Image (cartoon, rainbow, N blue to C red):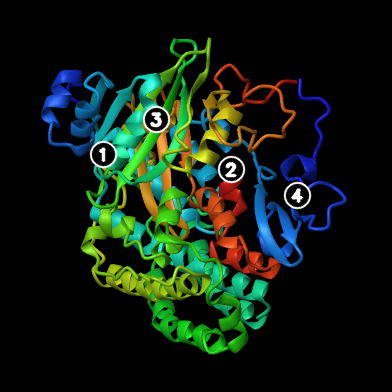
């Protein structure tokens, strides 16, 4: 079976050569709050307030292409929303996943559109379907659902068939 | 709760003309779609124009939103496969492949060589299928109606091959978690061989119809300029990215499903315009034919399903003779199979760009979250950059060149 996952420090040590980890640690030693290496994929947990700076750091480290921004709702546990960023490097040919947790009291996080303009649609989608707001987003409107829709359908407490 | 929903977002809420009313240099706002023949689905564009010149393009999407991601959370892992066909209905096999690879990564199971090679073969046939539709409809948007008839002639044969192998022409669901649904029927590889033998000259035929045509050239050359920096910043992938001079193809750079064993070129262009995207897609079709040929020539023998009885449905024969197989079959169908907790992201090169599946498992038989990263969704953001300062007619050419599928944008 799969071996027990390593803890944060062990992962950081094992992947000290990784450009994303190295640059994030140089920029801010406390930026990474957790790290996982599972199924050949590196997941770095970033503090909620640090995400834009972390995105900028990773971008400068050579991870030049933002593939995806999405969210996972871990209802009912708190912090509830896991905002997930997948970033790939065209030169290193490897991918890094940044995640940031957002609680349900104040579901909002900094937008990374200043770093990658392509985050625009993805963040609108996360707002539309999960109800997480992005600060300083240029156009924080619904994208899939009609503008007057009530609720955020991909939340786990939203029924699959909708409200009747 | 959702009782009286307005069906249409006011144009004025998306875009207001500038400057103020009554002024002489006031611009006009034009609503294009959702039902417009060149938008390949139900894309609505609100365009601000100054005379014939486009100043701003605001896409309004969501008309086809069916909540597939939400539906996936209520299905067993194997039941999600048919949902994936319906996202990008022009390249069903690519979607199947991407989802299956993601779940197989979660499960950490090995797929036999033969299954992997058949997956590559059908993946490339899907690319040909999708590019043929693209070429026909793109040419039709521009006004060259004939090409459509030619490309659909070859597409028909590909669809018949899909039907022979999976029973369905478009929504194939042929790839399953752990392998393939069925062994391809006898004689099918000969049929594919026959098809890919004639395809190169057919591609020449399309090229003869279009490439030398002065109207086609003038409608495409220099239109929809997208620089490499903009393409990367706006999340553009696939042929439009390569047409902007970025050498990136997931099949070669992050290989999956034994693509590393195939030799093929990745066409690149530095022209950054609609013409470059046209040329690159035609080249890609030729390369796809070569990959199909390599897959047929080196097709390994062996199983088409992984040796994982708790995940893969047993053969019909075994079910009738062996008790364990019957039990496993019953268990898989009624309870699904559990997947160890974790999260994976798997990306493949779809005909339109990077198709990615982000699957989160919480250790049960149903996915906790399935997210699709769709190429057209991101590429649509580049529309503004490509259309700004061009004519309205160029918007049609640009939409055609990014090969948009609204099913995958809205999901």
- Residue B255 is left or right of residue A111, and the answer is left
Numbered tag placed on residue B311 in the rendering? none
* SS at badge 1: loop
Label 2 to label 4: alpha-carbon separation: 34 Å
* SS at badge 4: loop
- Residue B256 is left or right of residue B159, and the answer is left
> Looking at the image, is mark 3 or mark 2 nearer the viewer?
3
> Residue tagged by mark 1?
B109
Residue A51: give x, y in percent of width and height.
Answer: 38, 27
Residue B288: give x, y in percent of width and height.
Answer: 37, 70
In the image, residue B82 above or below residue B195: above
> Residue tagged by mark 4?
B18
In the image, residue B256 above or below residue A24: below
> Residue tagged by mark 3?
A52
User: Are callouts 3 and 2 both on one chain?
Assistant: no
Residue B156: give x, y in percent of width and height.
Answer: 56, 72
User: Are callouts 2 and 4 both on one chain?
Assistant: yes
> Residue tagged by mark 2?
B411
Quick one: quadrant of the N terminus of chain A? top left
Q: Residue at x 32, y 69 (%)?
A: B291
């Amino acid at each position: 079976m799969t071996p027990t996952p390593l803890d944060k420090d062990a992962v950081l040590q094992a992947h000290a050569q990784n450009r994303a980890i190295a640059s994030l640690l140089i920029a801010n030693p406390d930026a990474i709050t957790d790290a996982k290496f599972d199924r050949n994929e590196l997941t770095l947990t970033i503090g909620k307030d640090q995400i834009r700076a972390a995105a900028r750091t990773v971008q400068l480290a050579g991870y030049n292409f933002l593939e995806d921004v999405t969210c996972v709702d871990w209802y009912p546990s708190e912090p509830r929303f896991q905002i997930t960023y997948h970033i790939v490097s065209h030169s290193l040919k490897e991918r890094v996943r940044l995640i940031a947790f957002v609680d349900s009291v104040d579901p909002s996080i900094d937008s990374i559109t200043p770093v990658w303009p392509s985050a625009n649609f993805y963040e609108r989608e996360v707002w539309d379907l999960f109800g997480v707001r992005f600060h300083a987003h240029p156009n924080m409107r619904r994208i899939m659902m009609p503008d007057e829709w009530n609720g955020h359908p991909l939340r786990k407490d939203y029924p699959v068939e909708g409200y009747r | 709760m959702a009782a009286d929903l307005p069906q249409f977002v006011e144009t004025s809420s998306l875009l207001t003309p500038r400057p103020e009313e009554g002024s002489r240099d006031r611009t006009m706002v034009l609503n294009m779609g959702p039902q417009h023949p060149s938008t390949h689905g139900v894309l609505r564009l609100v365009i601000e124009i100054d005379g014939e010149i486009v100043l701003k393009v605001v896409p309004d999407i969501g008309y086809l939103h069916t909540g597939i991601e939400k539906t996936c959370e209520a299905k067993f892992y194997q039941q999600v496969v048919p949902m994936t066909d319906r996202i990008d209905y022009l390249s069903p096999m690519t979607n199947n492949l991407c989802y299956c690879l993601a779940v197989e990564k979660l499960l950490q199971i090995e797929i036999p060589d033969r299954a992997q090679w058949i997956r590559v073969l059908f993946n490339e046939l899907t690319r040909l299928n999708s590019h043929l539709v693209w070429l026909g409809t793109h040419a039709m948007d521009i006004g060259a109606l004939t090409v459509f008839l030619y490309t659909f002639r070859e597409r028909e044969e590909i669809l018949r091959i899909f039907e022979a192998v999976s029973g369905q022409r478009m929504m194939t669901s042929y790839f399953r978690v752990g392998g393939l649904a069925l062994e391809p029927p006898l004689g099918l590889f000969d049929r594919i061989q026959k098809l890919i033998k004639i395809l190169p000259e057919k591609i020449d035929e399309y090229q003869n119809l279009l490439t030398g045509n002065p109207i086609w050239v003038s409608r495409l050359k220099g239109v929809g300029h997208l620089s490499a920096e903009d393409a990367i910043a706006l999340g553009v992938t696939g042929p439009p990215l390569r047409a902007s001079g970025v050498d990136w193809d997931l099949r070669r750079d992050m290989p999956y499903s034994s693509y590393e064993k195939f030799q093929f070129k990745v066409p690149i262009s530095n022209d950054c315009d609609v013409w470059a995207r046209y040329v690159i897609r035609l080249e890609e079709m030729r390369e796809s034919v070569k990959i199909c040929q390599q897959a047929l020539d080196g097709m390994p023998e062996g199983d088409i399903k992984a040796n994982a009885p708790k995940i893969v449905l047993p053969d019909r024969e075994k079910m009738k003779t062996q008790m364990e197989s019957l039990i496993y079959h019953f268990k898989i169908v009624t309870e699904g199979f559990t997947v160890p907790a974790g999260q994976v992201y798997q990306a493949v090169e779809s005909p339109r760009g990077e198709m990615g599946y982000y699957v989160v498992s919480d250790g049960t038989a149903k996915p906790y979250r399935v997210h699709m990263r769709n190429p057209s969704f991101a590429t649509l953001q580049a529309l503004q950059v490509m259309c700004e300062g061009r004519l309205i007619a160029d918007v049609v050419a640009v939409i055609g060149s990014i090969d948009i599928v609204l099913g995958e944008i809205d999901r």
